[in-house]
């Protein structure tokens, strides 16, 4: 059990830290979007008329798009998003719901399109390899939690113990305390994450029974489809359909989609979610695009599907509950601490022996740990800073602005590994200082480039997302500074003991 | 959603975990800054009341927030308040000292 825990942690640790880190940030993905896309920092408002969005629909018809969609504003995301796929990719426009004006392209993937997908796919889309890697890491995480409880020598005696006199003791105590006390949350969040992708990880469960994904979708999730007719068709009033959906659900729908724009078989799907409940289910009403007649509506889910909606919902936190959102964020950070201290304990308990026996293990793993822990944090901050420094509309060698931000992330991340392997003794401290400097710089750059400094952001309700982001960056900077200070003391200590041994 | 749900849930489970921690000699001594030991009957009471307080915390969460959000709040509040107790014991044990002093006063007639 001991070696199972050690080896699983060693092999999976880097991926697990990345998943925990990105997952923790994803708790506030839409708030990160507000920070990274300043054009979207507007007070929320209702969209007066969907029919007024007709020009975008006509463009989708001309582009022969397979689908046209409107995502309506919410408390966390105040803009309207119009999008359709044409031959070469997705065309997306953001709209101010108050004026109906089209907003400038923010040129960023932000929290919802970079950080959140990184959490579950590592942005490796080839053969869903990233999703599989995350799945394997999640299985590893479950193994680690079970084996960790079994090998814990004094789980009750040390339940509340955090002794900070000696580094190795502190690291192990911290690992044990966040591991044991965070266990319920970490276990449930890992298991539910696996269950969300259950159909990816266990494809035979449905492929063995259903001929196609459509038939399975219709039977399991009540997804309505009908074939395209390849004849021209009209679009009736979207507002009438929205009104019918509002009468049904008593709230504004989340999104409206039109399948096969311009076709005689086109149909409108009005999508509703209930942010007042834990369960995350997409309920839909489908209307004939031309006549506006109701074609189909999703039935009440069967008990197993309902349970799955609850499990997925508590992982995806699409509900409105700020208390829980912050708790998830804090417990997610504890997950990061657990993975990082696991690595540190591995290093601390082998450092002397490996040095004496001339083994390279500690050196290699230390570089990997620094790159995976402080490195990904630095890369994330560099991503934020690139976002504030690159002017809108920039492109370099045909790479669009949004992709440039991603390149900055990956190149900086790579550089942190190189730095960690080339300067293993100083890297921890230097990267902590880098985190502090970059986080502070991000706050400053946000102020300089948008004028939304912390005080201003705190005074306006619609800027609270920006204020929260700035406050977390400042808290991160302070924590990193504190760590750098403590690492300096420790470094001095180590040098002096070494000097004594040599002398 | 009531504004009281979170503070009450956290407070109840914090009290519960504090009692469980103080029922252990190491934390009892550290908090009281002496070398006394809680008598067994007091240990037993601390553990019972501790578990009851944690149960009450879960019930409070469920009562305020309903079965869905209540279960999530109750469950996550346990992790959070447990860590708060750990951090208090390490960095600011004076937070738990009043509780420990009250409990220690209860033992006085039995010392002799």
Image (tube, coloured by chain):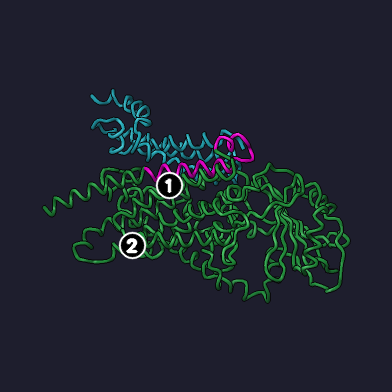
Q: Is residue A257 left or right of residue A400?
A: right
The one nearer the camera, A319 or A380, is: A380
In the rendered image of this protein, does residue A401 appear above or below residue B92? Answer: below
In the rendered image of this protein, does residue A374 appear above or below residue B15? Answer: below
Q: Residue at x 26, y 46 (%)?
A: A166
| Alpha carbons under labels 1 and 2: distance apart | 21 Å
Chain B's colour is cyan
> Disc 2: which chain?
A
Residue A320 spot, x, y in % from top left? 63, 45
- Residue A324 seen from this side: no
Whether residue A61 appears in magenta in the rendering, the answer is: no
Residue B27 spot, x, y in % from top left? 31, 37
**What main secondary structure does the magenta stretch of the protein show?**
helix
Q: Which residues are magenta?
A: A454-481
List the residue tagged with mark 1: A437
Q: Quadrant of residue A378?
A: bottom left
**Dividing the image into 4 quarters, which one contains the N terminus of chain A?**
bottom left
Q: Quadrant of residue A143?
A: bottom left
């Amino acid at each position: 059990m001991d070696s199972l825990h050690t080896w699983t942690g060693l092999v999976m640790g880097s991926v697990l830290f990345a998943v925990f880190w990105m997952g923790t940030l994803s708790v506030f993905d839409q708030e990160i979007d507000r920070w990274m896309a300043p054009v979207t920092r507007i007070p929320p408002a209702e969209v007066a008329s969907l029919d007024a969005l007709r020009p975008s629909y006509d463009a989708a018809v001309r582009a022969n798009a397979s689908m046209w969609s409107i995502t309506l504003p919410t408390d966390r995301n105040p803009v309207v998003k119009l999008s359709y796929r044409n031959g070469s990719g997705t065309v997306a426009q953001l709209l101010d719901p108050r004026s109906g004006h089209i907003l400038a392209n923010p040129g960023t993937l932000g929290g919802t399109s970079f950080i959140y997908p990184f959490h579950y796919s590592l942005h490796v889309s080839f053969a869903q390899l990233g999703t599989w890697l995350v799945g394997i890491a999640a299985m590893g995480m479950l193994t680690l939690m079970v084996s960790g409880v079994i090998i814990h020598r004094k789980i009750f005696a040390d339940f509340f113990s955090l002794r900070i006199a000696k580094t190795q003791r502190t690291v192990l105590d911290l690992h044990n305390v966040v591991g044991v006390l965070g266990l319920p949350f970490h276990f449930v969040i890992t298991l539910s994450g696996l269950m969300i992708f259950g159909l990816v990880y266990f494809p035979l469960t449905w492929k063995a029974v259903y001929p196609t994904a459509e038939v399975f979708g219709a039977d399991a999730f009540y997804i309505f489809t009908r074939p395209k007719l390849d004849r021209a068709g009209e679009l009736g009033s979207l507002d009438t359909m929205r009104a019918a959906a509002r009468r049904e659900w008593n709230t504004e729908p989340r999104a409206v989609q039109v399948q096969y724009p311009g076709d005689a078989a086109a149909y409108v799907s009005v999508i509703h979610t209930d942010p007042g409940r834990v369960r995350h289910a997409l309920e839909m009403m489908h209307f004939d695009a031309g006549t506006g007649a109701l074609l189909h509506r999703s039935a009440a889910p069967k008990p197993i599907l309902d349970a799955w909606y609850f499990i997925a919902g508590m992982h995806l936190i699409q509900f409105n509950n700020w208390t829980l959102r912050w708790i998830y964020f804090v417990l997610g950070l504890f997950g990061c601490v657990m993975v990082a201290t696991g690595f540190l304990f591995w290093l601390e308990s082998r450092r002397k022996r490996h040095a004496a026996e001339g083994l390279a293990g500690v050196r290699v793993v230390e570089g990997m740990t620094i790159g995976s822990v402080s490195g990904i944090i630095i890369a994330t901050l560099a991503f934020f800073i690139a976002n504030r420094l690159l002017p809108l509309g920039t492109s370099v060698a045909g790479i669009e602005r949004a992709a440039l931000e991603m390149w900055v992330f990956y190149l900086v991340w790579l550089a942190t590994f190189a730095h960690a392997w080339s300067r293993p003794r100083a890297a921890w401290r230097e990267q902590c200082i880098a985190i502090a400097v970059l986080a502070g710089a991000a706050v400053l750059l946000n102020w300089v480039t948008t004028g939304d400094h912390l005080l201003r952001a705190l005074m306006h309700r619609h800027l609270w997302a920006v204020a929260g982001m700035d406050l977390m960056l400042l808290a991160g900077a302070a924590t990193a500074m504190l760590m750098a200070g403590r690492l300096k003391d420790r470094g001095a200590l180590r040098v002096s003991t070494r000097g004594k041994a040599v002398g | 959603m009531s504004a009281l749900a979170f503070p009450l849930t956290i407070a109840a489970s914090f009290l519960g975990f504090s009692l469980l921690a103080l029922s252990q000699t190491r934390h009892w001594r550290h908090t009281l800054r002496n070398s006394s030991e809680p008598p067994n009957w007091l240990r037993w009471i601390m553990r019972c009341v501790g578990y009851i307080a944690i149960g009450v915390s879960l019930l409070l969460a469920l009562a305020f927030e309903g079965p869905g959000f209540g279960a999530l709040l109750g469950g996550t509040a346990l992790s959070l308040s447990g860590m708060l107790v750990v951090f208090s014991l390490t960095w600011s044990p004076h937070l738990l000292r009043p509780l420990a002093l009250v409990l220690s006063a209860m033992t006085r007639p039995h010392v002799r």
